[in-house]
Amino acid sequence: MAIAIRQARDDELEALIPILLLAEQSERALRWGLANLVDAVYRMDDSEHLVGLVQQP
């Protein structure tokens, strides 16, 4: 079990939207925040499985 934490690449963000929506009330607000407020999205993977996300404002 190898856990890795890294910044999500821009080309990965679209696939992460459904998971990020679990913590946001609307997709519109989420996308606006990603474009205007969030400096980075970090992902935590256990081997090849995504197990967590966090947004850094």
Image: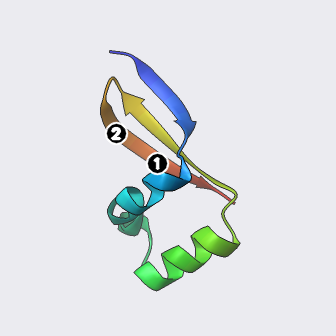
Q: Is residue 39 visible?
A: yes
Which quarter of the picture shows residue 32? bottom right
Q: Label 2: which residue?
A: 50
- Helix, strand or loop at label 2? It is strand
Give the position of the N terminus as an image quadrant. top left
Most distant residue in the top direction: 1
Image: 29 above or below 35: below
What residue is at 69 percent from the left and 60 percent from the top?
A: 57
Q: Label 1: how many residues lie within 10 Å, few (<14), some (14-19) or many (20+)?
A: some
Image location of residue 3, percent across then percent down: 43, 22
Where, by quadrant of the figure, is residue 34 drawn?
bottom right
Residue 15: x and y, percent? 36, 57
Q: Which mark is residue 17?
A: none
Q: 52 or 15, which lies in front?
A: 15
Are discs 1 and 2 less than 8 Å apart at CB? Answer: yes
Question: Which amino acid is tagged 2?
Answer: Leu
Question: Mark 1 is on which residue type?
Answer: Leu
Would you identify the image quadrant in which residue 23 lies? bottom left
Residue 28 position (above or below residue 49): below
Q: CA distance from mark 1 to mark 2?
A: 8 Å
Q: Nearer the viewer, residue 49 or 13?
A: 13
Residue at horizontal 38%, vertical 68%? 21
**What secondary structure is found at the residue carrying circle 1?**
strand
Instruction: Tell me the residue at 52%/75% (across/down).
Output: 31
Determine whether 9 is above or below 48 in the image. below
Query: What's the mark number on residue 53?
Result: 1
